[in-house]
Image (spheres, grey):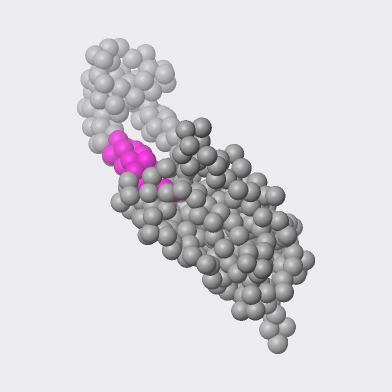
Amino acid sequence: MVDKPPAPAPSGAYPRLGTRGAVYLGLPRDSWRDAYHRLLTMPLWAFLATMAAGYVAVNALFAGLYLLDPQGVANARPGNFADAFFFSAQTLASVGYGAMWPRSLFVNAVVTAETFVGLFNLGLATGLLFARISRPTARIMFSRQAVVTLMDGVPTLMFRAANRRRNIVVEAEVSVTLIHDVRTLEGDVLRRFVELPVVRPRSPLFFLTWQVMHVIDENSPLYGDTRESLLARNAEVLVVMKGLDETFVSTIHARASYAPDEIVWGRRLADIFTSAPDGRRAIDFRRFHDIV
């Protein structure tokens, strides 16, 4: 949902939030209990491959059962797996070409069981596909880099976001959080989350671009920081944006994060507002990620 791909974490560092770079030790895997979640979150190609593999496996299973009765399927060659497999596929899909049909009690019982399984298989596949397609998603684009530049003479952390769908996100909100290591008096290292207040945390209508700014004054958690000090603290700036999509009438969210190497000091974001040939105001997204 985020168009700013996270950079890989260096060896020994904390994984970027929202990525799968963490290593889990001793955590049991609930593969079967989380099968629905896995099918919804895996890439589309993996989802289609999984469903295809399941379809082939079910047909192969019933084909093996049909082979137990060599004379049970009319016009099928005895012991021929291909004939049994294609008869299973026709039964599972309720096609029934008429070239092969069951003619024994055992095969009729297997056909009945396969038809029952086929009803569930079709319902499951339809439900999963609909859930993947109908799930509201955000198309929020974040600038690849953030900058720290002067605004009204005060250093300010800036980055920008844009809605790529060109529709309206109502009551959009953004929160920015500094995540960094702190060492306690006892010598323990803790991961701390500190809010970075922004100049405009809410926008009633978000449909063009949004330049998010945090003023680095004496009250800012970033006051006095440099790229080197942020690196030493394993710091990361986390951005979470949410709002009501006017098309879906559902809450959507997007997230991004900026590592110290992705925060440029002493430069500013390029101006992307220009004029179209007919005089109308235009936004040049070709310069969306540029800094000057």
Q: Which residues are magenta?
A: 121-138
| Residue 24, horizontal then vertical, whole percent | 60, 61
Q: How many marks?
A: 0
Q: Residue 18, located in which quarter of the rendered image?
A: bottom right
Q: Is residue 237 left or right of residue 41?
A: right
Closer to us: 247 or 10: 247
Image x and y of residue 245, in percent: 36, 51
What residue appears at the point 29 percent right and 19 percent down from the top-left corner?
A: 73
Q: Residue furthest front?
A: 279
| Magenta span: chief secondary structure | helix
> In the rendered structure, does residue 129 fall within the stretch colored magenta?
yes
Location of residue 227 with respect to 221 vertically, above or below: above
Horizontal side of 18 relative to 11 (left or right) equals left
| Image coords of residue 51 (percent x, y) | 42, 36
Is 45 placed left or right of 268 in the picture? Answer: left
Is 64 situated above or below 238? above
Where does residue 291 sit, x and y in percent of width and height? Answer: 67, 49
Q: Residue at x 33, y 25 (%)?
A: 88
Q: Residue furthest right?
A: 228
In this rendering, the answer to whether 138 lies above or below 92 is below
Asked if one can make out residue 265 in the rendered structure from this viewpoint, the answer is yes
Let me know if residue 146 is in the magenta part.
no
Instruction: Give whichever of 36, 163 is nearer the camera.
Output: 163
- Give the residue drawn at x 48%, y 42%: 281
Q: Can residue 61 be seen from the camera position used here?
A: no
In front of the other: 60 or 27: 27
Q: Residue furthest bottom?
A: 185
In the rendered image, which quarter is residue 113 located in?
top left
Taking the spot 39% from the left edge, 55% from the top edge, the residue there is 205
